[in-house]
Amino acid sequence: MAGEIAEIDTKVLSDQLKFLSEFLQKQGLSFLGVVSPETHEDFEKYQAWLVTGNHGELKYLEQNQKCRRSAKEALSSVQSVIVFGLSYAPEDAWPAPAYERARVAAYARFNDYHSLMKSSAQRAVTEWKKFCKATFEYRVVVDTVPLLERAFARKTGVGFVGKNTCFIHEERGSFLLLGEILMSLPFSLKEKNSNVNCGTCTLCQVECPTGALDQDYQIDSRKCLSYWTIEQRGPIPEEFWPGIGKYWFGCDICQLVCPFNKSAKDNELPELVKPKTYPSLFEVATMSEEEYEKIFGGTPLTRAKRNGLRRNALIAMAVNRDPLLEKAILYSRQDADYPISSTLDQIERFCSLNAAKK
Ligand code: B12
Ligand code: SF4
Ligand code: SF4
């Protein structure tokens, strides 16, 4: 097979790439660029970040380091990494209007993006394969293989990594989920650095409610609301509760305040992104296993599991002084597995402290 690949003319390959990008577009995805499988300086930054303990309990970030250094670990024949994205810019504004209840992060308001993006990219490659008639090996990756996805996106040169650590497309902003097609075809690589950057702006650092972005270009996951409300299974320290009153699953604040996302709001969501509406915090806090499956099955919220969502909803209710909180506590006491029981104890303390402050 290697022989067949070598015989394909470079000019032909570059034309082919144009068609592949069109096939991706037809599937609602944007083509960002083609880069090499190695991550070089990004890998060094990642290693330095690990040493500081910024990943907290996310032990999986310590594993599979070789893969984060080179995508060859995921597909040994890989010669090119095709980077694509799915835009999902929400209509949201920040600060949120006073009457608004706690939010779910924008990426989680539609069905799980991993399978959505993976199947769309897979369809694009299948269609393109029929058209180009070349023989090659490939693998579609959306967060399913431990790659440094932002590093590949950055190397395309169509955007940069901001102080909020997100990959920001120069024109489309950062509400862009990333995916890659690892390919054995030797497309000509178009790596470059974007000329655009954050400059003197520090809005994301100032507005982050927990100080997670205090160090330029580095996140302290242990302080990020997204880490606590999505990834962590245990009780959430009370110092982070005010933020959970605004976002009970994930957090978009450091993106909503970013000037590069102002024009991105005009993006049209691709047809495959169908926004969902979720029930009230009371319903989430008191939902049964069956209700959980019915409401949240197939959405990114399952990452936090049923008890993680119940925990988050109870906290958001306590912070926002929801009139149904007492009723929710009564229900929750009857089904108070880890971490609900500790969360209920915390709520008791939190409410009596707040009552004393009045
Ligand atoms: C672990 C993880 C998290 C953790 C840690 C976040 C983090 N910043 O690392 C937590 C739970 C906190 C998290 C939160 C979120 N996440 Co997350 N997360 C991941 C995951 C699985 C791994 C990230 C990782 O390896 N981190 C380690 C750090 C060190 O690496 P890095 O952030 O990729 O940065 C590298 C490069 O950008 C580069 N770099 C950074 N700055 C600079 C500067 C220069 C000059 C150079 C040369 C290089 C460079 O060096 C770094 C090391 O290689 C990725 C998927 C993936 N496989 O990449 C998604 C991913 C990063 N998450 C994503 C999203 C959407 C989010 C949230 C917005 C979700 C939400 N709404 O709540 C928040 C955003 C919080 C934030 N400000 O980052 C998207 C980001 C898309 C984008 N446009 O950037 C990703 C890529 C998933 C995807 N497939 O789309 N996430
Ligand atoms: S997602 Fe929220 S908590 Fe996390 S760094 Fe951004 S603003 Fe801070
Ligand atoms: S808010 Fe400002 S500092 Fe933060 S990522 Fe956007 S441009 Fe950079």
Image: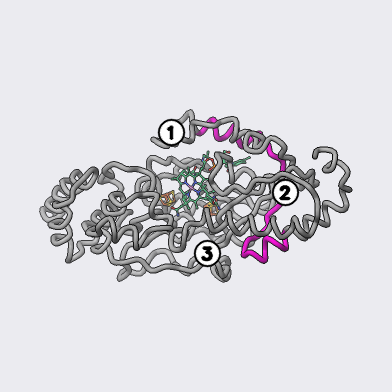
Q: CA distance from mark 2 to mark 1?
A: 30 Å
Q: Nearer the viewer, residue 342 or 40?
A: 342
Q: Is the CB atom of the residue marked by disc 2 within 8 angstroms of ligand 1's nearest atom?
A: no
Image vertical order of residue 9 relative to residue 265, above or below: above
Quadrant for the C terminus, please.
Answer: bottom left
Q: Residue at x 52, y 53 (%)?
A: 114
Image vertical order of residue 166 relative to residue 65, above or below: below
Q: Point out the residue furthest to the top here.
A: 51
Q: Nearer the viewer, residue 212 or 149?
A: 149
Q: Badge 1 is on which residue?
A: 59
User: SS of the residue at dot 2?
Assistant: strand
Question: Looking at the picture, which amino acid does disc 1 mark?
Answer: Lys
Q: Residue at x 27, y 57 (%)?
A: 313
Residue 216 location, x and y as percent? 51, 42
Residue 194 location, x and y as percent? 69, 50
User: SS of the residue at dot 3?
Assistant: loop
Pick whichever of labels 1 and 3 is earlier in the sequence. Answer: 1
Quadrant for the N terminus, please.
Answer: top right
Q: Badge 2 is on which residue?
A: 34
Give the residues drawn in magenta, as a range: 21-49
Question: Looking at the picture, which amino acid does disc 3 mark?
Answer: Ala
User: SS of the residue at dot 1?
Assistant: helix
Pick whichever of labels 2 and 1 is earlier in the sequence. Answer: 2
Q: CA distance from mark 3 to mark 2?
A: 24 Å
Q: Badge 3 is on which residue?
A: 89
| Pair 3/2: label in front | 2
Residue 131 location, x and y as percent? 78, 60
Q: Is residue 177 left or right of residue 340?
A: right
Residue 191 location, x and y as percent? 74, 45
Q: CA distance from mark 1 to mark 3?
A: 30 Å
